[in-house]
Image (cartoon, grey):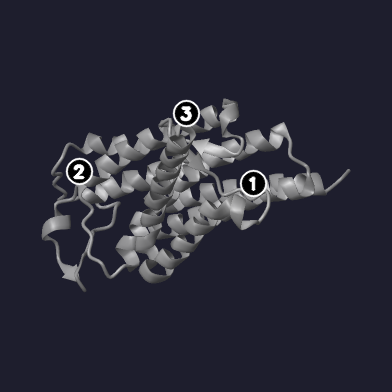
Amino acid sequence: MSIKKHIPNAITCCNLLCGCLAIVQAFEGNLVYAAYLVGLAAIFDFFDGFAARLLKVASPIGKDLDSLADMVTFGVVPGVVMFKLMFMSLLCSITDGPTSNGWTIYPPLSTHEHVKMILPEAVIYLAFLIPVFSAIRLAKFNNDTRQTSSFIGLPTPANAIFICSIPLIYEYSKIHIDLNPYILIAITVLLSLLLVAEIPLFALKFRNFSWRGNRIKYVFLLLSLVMLLTLQFVGIPLIIILYVLISVITNFYMKRKAIS
């Protein structure tokens, strides 16, 4: 039995394991640890496909396993993280609690005593639109022949990274941010719609490393590196926004060029 054909699936299982651990951490209120685990899972998600192509052992089972793992890590986990963020944002102590170094001190997420909600508590369940639309996104991807070398709609890893960057920014950034419940709801709805939107987005898959065929990818990676080095965690959601904007502008330019 050849061992190499199981290597990509083993890497995919590492992605799934990270997702399971991230769910545990998120429900316990350790959103930063959950975010790190999602980042680690994204690395595994990149390398499982890379390994399958390199070893030439791609299979339908590997494709299905990858989608199942992605559903947990990049669908359920960001939904749970957003659920916790929304709960935090609904606490009155967000606006009138004590502060330390410019940051509002939040009570533990498990604390329900003396909590007054500024919105109906049921609104936090809107967070689970994210796993629902992620499931639709992954199902469409598996059956859409147009998405062999590019994407249509925001990829689930990009969506999960955007959401999981919020607790990292809150924890480590020097920029003061408020977890406004209305903003979190808007982010949830917008990202859910982007998951299934008919918007072509380029994929970071390199068939070769020439500049001519990959200039957009190289420019994006260079700009992303600059944003990470200068803005650190704040740069993460901006990179996702940049990814969508570059894709939209590129597609618009290509359509104009084709018409002319």
Quarter of the image for the N terminus: give it.
top right
> Can you identify the residue that label 2 sits on?
182
Coordinates of residue 23 in the picture (x, y in percent) = 46, 47
Does the image show residue 3? yes
> Can you identify the residue that label 3 sits on?
136
Residue closest to the eye, 210 or 69: 210
Does the image show residue 30? no
Residue type at tag 3: Ile
Assign a secondary structure to mark 3. helix
> Can you identify the residue that label 1 sits on?
13
Residue 83 to residue 111: above or below: above
Residue type at tag 2: Tyr
Residue type at tag 1: Cys
Q: Residues within 10 Å of mark 1 (few under 14, many from 20)?
A: many
Q: Residues within 10 Å of mark 2 (few under 14, many from 20)?
A: few
CA distance separating discs 1 and 3: 21 Å
**In front of the other: label 1 or label 2?**
2
The residue at the point 37 percent across, 61 percent down is: 235
Coordinates of residue 29 in the picture (x, y in percent) = 36, 54
Q: Going from the N terminus, do you reach mark 2 or mark 3 first?
A: 3
The residue at the point 30 percent across, 35 percent down is: 126
From the viewer's perspective, tell me whether residue 196 is left or right of residue 83: right
From the viewer's perspective, tell me whether residue 196 is left or right of residue 217: left
**In front of the other: label 1 or label 3?**
3
CA distance separating discs 2 and 3: 25 Å
Q: Going from the N terminus, do you reach mark 1 or mark 3 first?
A: 1
Coordinates of residue 223 in the picture (x, y in percent) = 44, 61
Assign a secondary structure to mark 2. helix
| Quarter assignment of residue 237 | bottom left
Q: Residue furthest front?
A: 260
Quarter of the image for the C terminus: give it.
top left
Residue closest to the eye, 157 or 125: 157
